[in-house]
Image (spheres, rainbow, N blue to C red):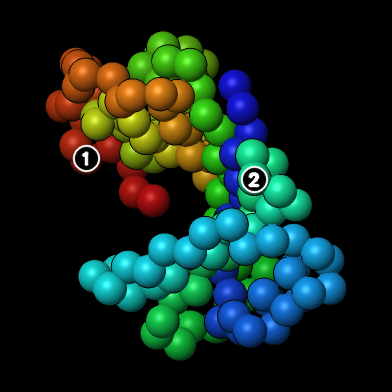
């Protein structure tokens, strides 16, 4: 498993980028805009390949408080299906099943979302994951 990033939400984008980039010295590695989702993602790190902070800026004004400004931890895993089977057997809540063979979300005991991303190419869709359309809400 490889730790990838943590995500925070901000409605103070300029101040947030100033803090992390100018004051702390992180670098903006990449940016992604989603017109359909009305948000932008900024990925910051000390260097390419290092764990990142994903700063999510929703374009519509929204107020965040402690608790809803932190998003999730992300880990790259060797086999997303095997890991999700192990987690499910241990009664871990699956918020978003890995039905696409690439991404899943689970919840830790503290109700923090954990994003799991398949290493390399996505795996072929397989049961029971593809029929788990309505599991959890995230």
Q: Is residue 38 left or right of residue 64?
A: left
Q: Position of residue 83 (x, y in %)?
A: 46, 16
Q: Are there few (<14), some (14-19), or many (20+) residues within 10 Å of tag 1?
A: few
Considering every residue shown, the one lying at the far bottom of the view is 61
Residue occupying image coordinates x 56% and y 49%: 72
Q: Secondary structure at mark 2?
A: loop
Q: How many marks?
A: 2
The residue shown at (41%, 63%) is 32
Q: What mark, if any, has residue 134 been given in the picture? A: 1
List x then y, in percent, for residue 52: 64, 49
> In the rendered image, which quarter contains the N terminus?
top right
Q: Contact (CB < 8 A) between labels 2 and 1?
A: no
2 vs 1, front mark: 2
Q: Helix, strand or loop at disc 1?
A: loop
Q: Picture coordinates of residue 54 (x, y %)?
A: 57, 57
Q: Residue furthest right?
A: 23
Observer able to see residue 70: no
- Above or below for 64 versus 116: below
Q: Mark 2 or 1 closer to N-term? A: 2
Lateral position of residue 77 relative to residue 16, left or right: left
Residue 31 left/right relative to 14: left
For residue 1, above or below residue 95: above
Q: Position of residue 69 (x, y in %)?
A: 60, 67
Q: Which residue is mark 2?
A: 48
Q: Residues within 10 Å of mark 2 (few under 14, many from 20)?
A: few
Q: CA distance from mark 2 to mark 1?
A: 36 Å
Pick the front one: 38 or 87: 38
In the displayed orientation, state which residue is furthest to the left: 131
């Amino acid at each position: 498993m490889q730790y990838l990033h943590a995500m925070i939400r901000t409605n103070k984008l300029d101040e947030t980028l100033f803090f992390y980039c100018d004051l702390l010295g992180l670098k903006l590695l990449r940016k992604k805009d989603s017109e359909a989702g009305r948000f932008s993602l900024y990925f910051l790190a000390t260097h390419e390949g290092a764990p990142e902070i994903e700063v999510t800026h929703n374009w519509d004004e929204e107020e965040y408080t402690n608790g809803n400004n932190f998003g999730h931890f992300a880990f790259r895993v060797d086999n997303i299906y095997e890991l999700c089977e192990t987690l499910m057997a241990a009664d871990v809540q699956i918020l978003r099943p890995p039905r696409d063979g690439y991404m899943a979300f689970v919840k830790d005991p503290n109700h923090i979302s954990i994003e799991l991303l398949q290493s390399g190419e996505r795996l072929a869709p397989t049961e029971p994951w593809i029929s788990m359309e309505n599991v959890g809400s995230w």
